[in-house]
Image: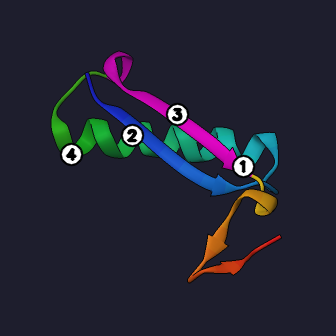
Amino acid sequence: MPYVRIDLLQGRTKEQIQQLMEDVVEAVVKNTNVSKESVHVIVNELQRTHLTKNGEYMG
């Protein structure tokens, strides 16, 4: 039962997130020989105010 977690900065539409999840499910099914029903995708949207890159505040 594969679980895929994706962390993204906020800013994508509901449709973009949905398409991303569908594409990820198809890739996992294709490459791991599991059923579509067994794949779980979790998308965690991050706020820029809660992130630094190379120690620099992104907010």
Q: Earlier in the sequence, mark 3 or mark 4?
A: 4
The quadrant of the image that shows the C terminus is bottom right
| Amino acid marked by disc 3 | Ile
Q: Earlier in the sequence, mark 3 or mark 1?
A: 1
Give the foreground label among 3 and 4. Answer: 3
| Amino acid marked by disc 2 | Glu
| Amino acid marked by disc 1 | Gln
Q: Which residue is painted at 62% across and 41% down in the image?
A: 44
In the displayed structure, does residue 49 sit left or right of residue 26? right
- Say which mark, if any, is on residue 31: 4
> Which percent across, then down, holds residue 27?
34, 46
Colour scheme employed for the rendering of this structure: rainbow
- Say which mark, if any, is on residue 16: 1
Q: How far apart are labels 1 and 4 at the CA level?
A: 23 Å
Report which residue position mark 3 lands on. 42
Decide: few, some or many residues near mark 4? Use Cα within 10 Å; few <14, some 14-19, many ≥20: few
Does residue 36 lie above or below 9 as drawn? Answer: above
> Which percent across, then down, holds residue 58?
76, 74
Report which residue position mark 2 lands on. 26
Magenta-colored stretch includes residue 43: yes
The quadrant of the image that shows the N terminus is top left
> Which percent across, then down, holds residue 9?
70, 59
Give the foreground label among 2 and 3. Answer: 3
Q: Which residues are magenta?
A: 36-46
Q: Earlier in the sequence, mark 2 or mark 1?
A: 1
Q: How far apart are labels 2 and 1 at the CA level?
A: 15 Å
- Asked whether the residues under the numbered discs 3 and 4 touch, taking CB atoms below 8 Å apart as contact, a structural biologist would say no
In the displayed structure, does residue 27 sit left or right of residue 8? left
Give the foreground label among 2 and 1. Answer: 1
SS class of the residue under badge 2? helix
